[in-house]
Amino acid sequence: MIDLRPYASLGGANHGWLDAKHHFSFANYYDPARTNWGNLRVWNDDTIAPQTGFPPHPHRDMEIITYVREGAITHQDNLGNLGRTEAGDVQVMSAGTGITHSEYNKEDITTKIFQIWIQPTRSGEKPGWGARPFPKGDRAGQFVVLASGFAEDGDALPIRTDARVVGATLKAGETAEYPLGKDRRGYLVPATGAVEIDGVRVNARDGAAIRDEAVLRVTAIEDSEIVLVDAA
Protein backbone atom coordinates (compact mmCIF):
# COMPACT_ATOMS: atom_id res chain seq x y z
CA MET A 1 0.00 0.00 0.00
CA ILE A 2 1.27 3.45 -0.98
CA ASP A 3 -0.41 6.53 0.50
CA LEU A 4 0.88 9.50 -1.49
CA ARG A 5 1.07 12.79 0.40
CA PRO A 6 1.84 15.53 -2.15
CA TYR A 7 4.02 18.41 -1.03
CA ALA A 8 1.17 20.85 -1.69
CA SER A 9 -0.99 18.97 0.85
CA LEU A 10 1.47 19.29 3.73
CA GLY A 11 0.86 21.50 6.72
CA GLY A 12 3.26 24.23 7.69
CA ALA A 13 4.02 27.83 8.52
CA ASN A 14 6.28 30.53 7.13
CA HIS A 15 7.98 32.49 9.90
CA GLY A 16 10.13 34.60 7.56
CA TRP A 17 13.46 33.21 8.70
CA LEU A 18 11.97 29.68 8.64
CA ASP A 19 9.66 28.19 6.02
CA ALA A 20 8.53 24.88 7.52
CA LYS A 21 6.41 22.15 5.92
CA HIS A 22 5.09 19.34 8.12
CA HIS A 23 4.41 15.80 6.88
CA PHE A 24 2.80 15.06 10.28
CA SER A 25 0.89 17.10 12.85
CA PHE A 26 3.31 19.55 14.45
CA ALA A 27 3.08 22.85 16.34
CA ASN A 28 -0.07 24.65 15.16
CA TYR A 29 -0.73 22.16 12.35
CA TYR A 30 -3.01 19.28 13.30
CA ASP A 31 -4.44 16.59 11.04
CA PRO A 32 -5.87 13.55 12.86
CA ALA A 33 -5.04 11.39 9.84
CA ARG A 34 -1.39 12.46 9.97
CA THR A 35 -0.17 12.21 13.55
CA ASN A 36 2.49 9.53 13.07
CA TRP A 37 3.48 6.54 10.93
CA GLY A 38 4.41 3.79 13.33
CA ASN A 39 7.05 5.19 15.65
CA LEU A 40 7.89 7.96 13.14
CA ARG A 41 6.42 11.08 14.74
CA VAL A 42 7.77 14.11 12.81
CA TRP A 43 9.12 14.80 9.34
CA ASN A 44 9.67 18.51 8.84
CA ASP A 45 10.92 20.04 5.60
CA ASP A 46 12.68 23.20 6.80
CA THR A 47 14.12 26.06 4.76
CA ILE A 48 16.26 28.31 6.99
CA ALA A 49 17.41 31.77 5.93
CA PRO A 50 21.12 32.71 6.18
CA GLN A 51 22.42 33.75 9.61
CA THR A 52 19.27 32.60 11.41
CA GLY A 53 18.12 29.49 13.22
CA PHE A 54 16.55 27.81 16.20
CA PRO A 55 17.69 29.37 19.52
CA PRO A 56 18.39 27.13 22.54
CA HIS A 57 15.40 24.98 23.50
CA PRO A 58 14.92 21.67 25.36
CA HIS A 59 13.90 18.15 24.32
CA ARG A 60 13.61 14.80 26.04
CA ASP A 61 12.65 11.24 25.05
CA MET A 62 13.00 11.66 21.29
CA GLU A 63 15.46 10.59 18.58
CA ILE A 64 15.99 13.59 16.28
CA ILE A 65 17.74 13.02 12.97
CA THR A 66 18.73 15.95 10.74
CA TYR A 67 19.42 15.29 7.06
CA VAL A 68 21.02 18.34 5.44
CA ARG A 69 19.90 18.82 1.82
CA GLU A 70 21.53 22.19 1.05
CA GLY A 71 23.86 24.48 2.98
CA ALA A 72 24.90 23.51 6.50
CA ILE A 73 23.57 23.51 10.06
CA THR A 74 25.59 24.28 13.19
CA HIS A 75 24.59 22.41 16.35
CA GLN A 76 25.44 23.41 19.92
CA ASP A 77 24.13 21.92 23.16
CA ASN A 78 24.47 22.06 26.93
CA LEU A 79 26.65 18.92 26.90
CA GLY A 80 29.42 20.87 25.20
CA ASN A 81 28.88 19.44 21.72
CA LEU A 82 29.51 21.80 18.81
CA GLY A 83 29.44 20.71 15.19
CA ARG A 84 28.69 21.79 11.64
CA THR A 85 26.85 19.33 9.38
CA GLU A 86 26.99 19.95 5.62
CA ALA A 87 24.72 19.00 2.73
CA GLY A 88 24.46 15.24 2.28
CA ASP A 89 25.57 14.58 5.84
CA VAL A 90 23.53 13.53 8.86
CA GLN A 91 23.39 14.38 12.56
CA VAL A 92 21.58 12.53 15.33
CA MET A 93 20.52 13.87 18.71
CA SER A 94 19.25 11.42 21.31
CA ALA A 95 17.36 13.66 23.71
CA GLY A 96 17.25 10.98 26.42
CA THR A 97 16.60 12.35 29.90
CA GLY A 98 16.89 15.92 28.60
CA ILE A 99 19.04 18.16 26.42
CA THR A 100 19.02 21.84 25.44
CA HIS A 101 20.32 22.67 21.97
CA SER A 102 20.41 25.29 19.22
CA GLU A 103 20.53 24.79 15.45
CA TYR A 104 21.74 27.75 13.38
CA ASN A 105 22.36 28.37 9.73
CA LYS A 106 25.58 30.35 10.05
CA GLU A 107 26.13 30.28 6.28
CA ASP A 108 25.64 33.06 3.76
CA ILE A 109 23.25 30.84 1.79
CA THR A 110 19.91 29.23 2.56
CA THR A 111 20.01 25.89 4.36
CA LYS A 112 17.45 23.17 3.70
CA ILE A 113 17.00 20.19 6.00
CA PHE A 114 14.74 17.26 6.71
CA GLN A 115 14.20 17.03 10.46
CA ILE A 116 12.96 13.58 11.47
CA TRP A 117 11.74 12.62 14.95
CA ILE A 118 11.35 8.98 15.93
CA GLN A 119 9.96 7.87 19.28
CA PRO A 120 12.56 5.93 21.30
CA THR A 121 12.10 2.38 22.50
CA ARG A 122 14.65 2.89 25.29
CA SER A 123 14.25 5.60 27.91
CA GLY A 124 16.07 6.83 30.98
CA GLU A 125 19.43 7.12 29.18
CA LYS A 126 21.79 10.07 29.03
CA PRO A 127 21.38 12.43 26.06
CA GLY A 128 23.87 12.33 23.21
CA TRP A 129 24.75 13.82 19.84
CA GLY A 130 26.75 12.69 16.82
CA ALA A 131 27.26 13.47 13.14
CA ARG A 132 29.07 11.99 10.17
CA PRO A 133 29.44 12.41 6.42
CA PHE A 134 27.67 10.07 4.01
CA PRO A 135 29.13 10.73 0.53
CA LYS A 136 26.43 10.56 -2.13
CA GLY A 137 28.74 8.46 -4.28
CA ASP A 138 28.59 5.68 -1.67
CA ARG A 139 24.80 5.67 -2.04
CA ALA A 140 24.81 5.56 -5.84
CA GLY A 141 22.30 3.00 -7.06
CA GLN A 142 21.64 1.52 -3.62
CA PHE A 143 20.17 2.18 -0.21
CA VAL A 144 22.68 2.87 2.57
CA VAL A 145 21.80 2.92 6.27
CA LEU A 146 22.43 6.39 7.73
CA ALA A 147 21.05 5.96 11.26
CA SER A 148 19.93 2.79 12.96
CA GLY A 149 18.79 1.25 16.21
CA PHE A 150 20.14 -2.16 15.16
CA ALA A 151 23.61 -3.37 16.15
CA GLU A 152 24.23 -5.02 12.78
CA ASP A 153 24.28 -1.59 11.10
CA GLY A 154 27.63 -0.76 12.65
CA ASP A 155 28.62 2.03 10.25
CA ALA A 156 25.40 3.98 10.80
CA LEU A 157 24.80 6.66 13.41
CA PRO A 158 23.19 4.97 16.44
CA ILE A 159 19.64 5.77 17.48
CA ARG A 160 17.74 4.35 20.47
CA THR A 161 14.72 3.03 18.64
CA ASP A 162 13.43 0.21 16.48
CA ALA A 163 13.97 2.05 13.21
CA ARG A 164 16.40 2.86 10.43
CA VAL A 165 16.97 5.97 8.33
CA VAL A 166 18.34 5.06 4.90
CA GLY A 167 19.30 7.01 1.79
CA ALA A 168 19.98 6.41 -1.89
CA THR A 169 20.94 8.40 -4.98
CA LEU A 170 19.56 7.03 -8.24
CA LYS A 171 20.12 8.03 -11.85
CA ALA A 172 17.04 8.24 -14.07
CA GLY A 173 15.99 4.70 -14.95
CA GLU A 174 17.82 3.03 -12.06
CA THR A 175 15.98 0.81 -9.58
CA ALA A 176 16.98 0.12 -5.98
CA GLU A 177 15.43 -2.41 -3.62
CA TYR A 178 15.04 -2.22 0.14
CA PRO A 179 13.88 -5.20 2.26
CA LEU A 180 11.22 -3.40 4.27
CA GLY A 181 9.16 -6.38 5.46
CA LYS A 182 5.39 -6.67 5.60
CA ASP A 183 5.30 -6.00 9.34
CA ARG A 184 7.13 -2.68 8.97
CA ARG A 185 6.15 0.80 7.81
CA GLY A 186 8.17 2.92 5.43
CA TYR A 187 8.03 6.66 4.84
CA LEU A 188 9.90 7.83 1.75
CA VAL A 189 10.61 11.39 0.58
CA PRO A 190 12.69 12.33 -2.47
CA ALA A 191 14.88 15.30 -1.56
CA THR A 192 15.28 15.88 -5.30
CA GLY A 193 13.98 14.27 -8.48
CA ALA A 194 11.03 11.93 -8.84
CA VAL A 195 10.57 8.20 -8.33
CA GLU A 196 7.98 5.49 -8.94
CA ILE A 197 6.84 2.90 -6.38
CA ASP A 198 4.26 0.30 -7.43
CA GLY A 199 3.09 2.56 -10.25
CA VAL A 200 2.78 5.62 -7.98
CA ARG A 201 4.86 8.68 -8.89
CA VAL A 202 6.46 10.45 -5.94
CA ASN A 203 7.84 13.89 -6.76
CA ALA A 204 10.49 15.86 -4.90
CA ARG A 205 9.43 16.58 -1.30
CA ASP A 206 6.23 14.51 -1.57
CA GLY A 207 5.78 11.88 1.11
CA ALA A 208 4.93 8.24 0.49
CA ALA A 209 3.58 6.24 3.45
CA ILE A 210 4.24 2.57 2.70
CA ARG A 211 3.13 -0.68 4.32
CA ASP A 212 2.57 -4.33 3.38
CA GLU A 213 5.65 -4.31 1.14
CA ALA A 214 8.09 -7.15 1.81
CA VAL A 215 10.59 -5.67 -0.66
CA LEU A 216 10.36 -2.02 -1.63
CA ARG A 217 11.31 -1.36 -5.28
CA VAL A 218 12.02 2.26 -6.13
CA THR A 219 12.66 3.35 -9.73
CA ALA A 220 13.98 6.83 -10.52
CA ILE A 221 12.02 8.76 -13.14
CA GLU A 222 14.58 11.58 -12.83
CA ASP A 223 17.97 11.72 -11.12
CA SER A 224 16.88 11.47 -7.48
CA GLU A 225 18.12 11.74 -3.91
CA ILE A 226 15.94 9.67 -1.58
CA VAL A 227 15.48 9.44 2.18
CA LEU A 228 13.49 6.58 3.73
CA VAL A 229 12.52 5.80 7.32
CA ASP A 230 11.95 2.12 8.12
CA ALA A 231 9.66 2.33 11.16
CA ALA A 232 8.14 -0.12 13.60
Image (spheres, grey):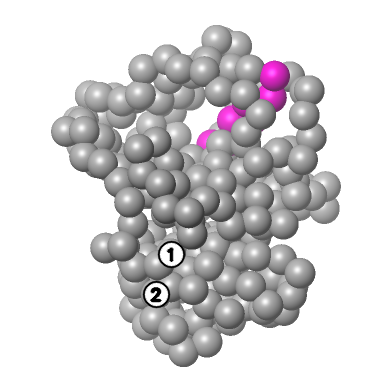
Judge left or right: residue 153 versus residue 6.
right
Mark 1: which amino acid? Gly
Among all residues in the image, which is located at the extreme right? 151
Specify whether residue 227 is in view: yes
Q: Quadrant of the C terminus?
A: bottom right
The one of 121 and 157 positioned closer to us in this rendering: 121
Name the residue tied to disc 1: 207
Q: Residue at x 40, y 47 (%)?
A: 30
Judge left or right: residue 167 versus residue 8.
right
Q: Residue at x 45, y 24 (%)?
A: 75
Q: Picture coordinates of residue 63 (x, y %)?
A: 62, 36
User: What range of the chain is rendered magenta?
Assistant: 91-97
Name the residue tied to disc 2: 202
Q: Is residue 93 magenta?
A: yes
- Asked if marks 1 and 2 touch (Cβ < 8 Å), the reply is yes
Label 1 Cα neighbours within 10 Å, binned few <14 / some 14-19 / many ≥20: many
Q: Is residue 122 above or below residue 194?
A: above
Mark 2: which amino acid? Val
The one of 97 and 87 positioned closer to us in this rendering: 97
Query: Toward which corner of the image does residue 47 lie, by quadrant?
Result: top left
Q: Secondary structure at mark 2?
A: strand
Q: Is residue 36 magenta?
A: no
Q: Residue at x 21, y 33 (%)?
A: 15
Q: Secondary structure at mark 1?
A: strand
Question: Which is more N-terminal, label 2 or label 1?
Answer: 2
Q: Residue at x 26, y 41 (%)?
A: 13
Among all residues in the image, which is located at the extreme left? 16
Q: Picture coordinates of residue 163 (x, y %)?
A: 70, 52
